[in-house]
Image: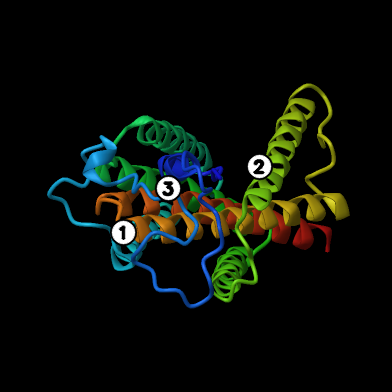
Amino acid sequence: MRTSNPIFSRWGAARDAGPAGAYARRPVGATVGGPPEGDHPTNPYAPSAGTGTRAGGAAVTMDDVVVRTATTLGTVALAAVLSWLLLPVDEANVGRSYGIAFGAALVAFALSMVQTLRQTPSPALILGYAASEGFFLGVLSSTVSTYIAPGVVVQAVLGTFAVSAGVLIAYRMRWIRVTRRFAGFLAAAATGFLLLLIADALFSAFGAGNGLGFHSGGLGIAFGALGVLLGAGFLAMDLRQVEDAVAYGAPREEAWLAAFGLTLTLVWIYLEVLRVLTIFHSDN
């Protein structure tokens, strides 16, 4: 199984190569620290695997992932707050603020692509992405709060926390089973979702001001809710990937990749929650 989050692809690819199938379910309460039951017997991070990543290096732990993720998300939050305060979106400064936000979005995209293509994680790239993403989110959130739906940003943050906590609880209780079928369905749904987004953007750019109707009304709320559900599914996949990386004893630096991937997913969820709440407030 492969997550849509590209930084987890090495973990997924290594397990997919196993003849026994990498996604046999681990029993509830099983101890993390050894290969999951039913997985292939070859540890993809062992020195014999030819990667050399484990030679003389410490293995990743869940604490490593938590600390790196907190650092990355903290950078996003700090940059968002600074951009909100330093880049006002009033009439006198809106052009400058939008220009900086657009540039930050491009930088965030470029850094994320560079990190995705790298064979090893780079904390500098990941934190640079987090800072750039934060500046973009800060200006976007300030604009929405100022001109469209005052107070909606706090609701969106709380909604993101609620969705994330719900997924974490459901995953830990094994109410969500991350299987090959789950991943395949999620990949198909995400592909359709992204194609609709592209079509909507094209219709908006070439004359249809409201695009496909995803910017308002019940259809817009439903489309945004679908985006939130997809983000929740990706978060469950990311949690499984992290759990398996710890179980296989992946090298410690992989914690930065986990932090990067989780941040990407949480930003997705925040944006979709913000979309739903903005449309709801606008329609009322």
Task: Identify the residue at image location x=53%, y=75%.
Answer: 28
Question: Horizontal placement of 220 versus 41: left or right?
Answer: right
- Amino acid on which disc 1 is placed: Arg
Q: Which residue is mark 3?
A: 135
Quarter of the image with the C terminus in it: bottom right
**Nearer-the-camera pick, 52 or 119:** 52
x and y, in percent, of residue 210 in the image: 82, 37
**Nearer-the-camera pick, 231 or 33:** 33
Disc number for residue 68: 1
Quarter of the image with the N terminus in it: top right
Q: Is residue 102 above or below residue 253?
A: above
Q: Is residue 276 above or below residue 159?
A: above
Tell me which label, 3 or 2, sits earlier in the chain: 3
- Amino acid on which disc 2 is placed: Ala
Which mark lies nearer to you, 2 or 1? Answer: 2
Tell me which label, 1 or 3, sits earlier in the chain: 1
Image marks 1 and 3: residues in contact by CB distance under 8 Å: no
Q: Secondary structure at mark 3?
A: helix
- Amino acid on which disc 3 is placed: Phe
Gap in angstroms between the C-alphas marked 2 and 1: 27 Å
Question: Horizontal placement of 27 versus 213: left or right?
Answer: left
Disc number for residue 132: none
**Nearer-the-camera pick, 249 or 69:** 249
User: What is the crowding at mark 2: few (fewer than 14 residues within 10 Å), some, or many (at least 20)?
Assistant: some
Q: How is the image coloured?
A: rainbow
| Residue 208 in sight | yes
x and y, in percent, of residue 11 in the image: 42, 45
The picture quadrant where one finds residue 114 is: top left
